[in-house]
Every structure is written in structure tokens, then in C-alpha cells.
Amino acid sequence: YMGRKKSPHWTQVHDLTVDMDYFQRHQHPGPGDCISWAAGKHAQGYGMIGAFREDGTKIMTTVHRVVARLKYDEPLESSQMVVHSCGNLNCCNPDHIEKGDRQTIINYRRKHGRFTSGWKKTKLKHPRKP
């Protein structure tokens, strides 16, 4: 996918250029009123899409960050956080995507039962042997 040249479907989305035909083709009804991303996914479950930066560099970015650029009609700083209010990391429904800060993310993770703090998380994944 990333090897393809820019086609007429490539559209400027503020600081990125995205193949909007590909973007629209890979959105499908999901659980509840979520819209699921049906193409490549990050190991953590986030939808991924190829894009070009303004300098022409090819990158992979998360779909929810592209959706946030479209929804808020502005570019995102790399430090700007984007949150899934539904708790579905694969969701690309603009109604479920919000800009936020670290506390916003923690609040939504708690709400959806996906929050563990440092020690507990480490202990659960890597129990120490006596």
C-alpha cells in the first residue's frame, strides 16, 4: 500500500495527505454505533493507514488521528491526544473521537474497564518467580 504513487484519491487533510478512497472503503458497521476499521491494525488494536507528511515523507498513522483532523478541521500536534469515547480502539466514528489530555484518556479507560496502573499491570503480565 505505501509503495503506491499518489493517485487522484489522495486528499490533503491539514498536515497529512491521505488516500480518501481507501479510507472510506475500509470503514464498516461495528458493534453498537461504532464504525470499525477493516484494514491494517496496530498490535494494540488501533486502525492504521498510510499517509504522506507535508515534506513528502511516507508514514503510517492511526485512523482515529485522521478522523480527528477531519472532525475538528485542524492539524494535530504529535503531542495532542485523541480518545475513543466508546472504548473501541478500532472505531473510526467521528462521534466517538475526541481530543483530550492524559486525564481524559485515563477517565475513559476506567469507564470501559481498560485501566491498570504501573505496578498492577507489570505484576499481571510478568509475575515474579520466588
Image (spheres, grey):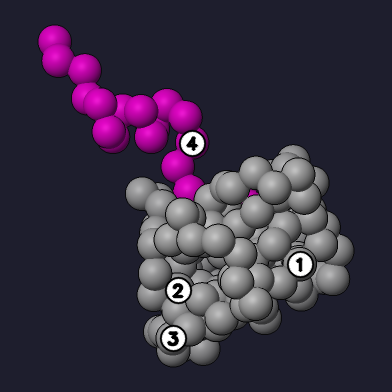
- Look at discs 4 and 3 and give the one toward the viewer: 3
Q: Are marks 1 and 2 in contact (CB under 8 Å)?
A: no
Mark 3 Cα within 10 Å, few/some/many (few <14, many 20+)?
A: some
The amino acid at mark 1 is Gln
Q: Are marks 1 and 3 in contact (CB under 8 Å)?
A: no
Residue 38 in which image quadrant:
bottom left
- How far is mark 2 from mark 3, CA to CA? 7 Å
Q: Secondary structure at mark 4?
A: loop
The amino acid at mark 4 is Ser
Q: Is residue 83 left or right of residue 117?
A: right
Q: Secondary structure at mark 3?
A: strand
- How far is mark 1 from mark 3, CA to CA? 23 Å
**Which residue in the structure is indicated by mark 2?**
37
Residue 72 in which image quadrant:
bottom right
**Which residue in the structure is indicated by mark 1?**
12
The amino acid at mark 2 is Trp
Q: Is residue 106 left or right of residue 34?
A: right
Q: Which quarter shows the N terminus?
A: bottom left
Looking at the picture, how far across and down is residue 74, in whole percent? 86, 63
Task: Looking at the image, tell me whether mark 4 or mark 3 is earlier in sequence order.
Answer: 3
- Look at discs 4 and 2 and give the one toward the viewer: 2
Mark 4 Cα within 10 Å, few/some/many (few <14, many 20+)?
A: few
The amino acid at mark 3 is His
Does the magenta-highlighted stretch encompass residue 123?
yes
Looking at the picture, how far across and down is residue 70, in whole percent? 75, 73
- In magenta, the rendered stretch is 105-130
Residue 119 in which image quadrant:
top left
- How far is mark 1 from mark 2, CA to CA? 20 Å
**Which residue in the structure is indicated by mark 3?**
28
Q: Which residue is located at x 13 percent, y 10 percent?
A: 130
Task: Looking at the image, tell me whether mark 2 or mark 3 is earlier in sequence order.
Answer: 3
Q: Are marks 2 and 3 in contact (CB under 8 Å)?
A: no
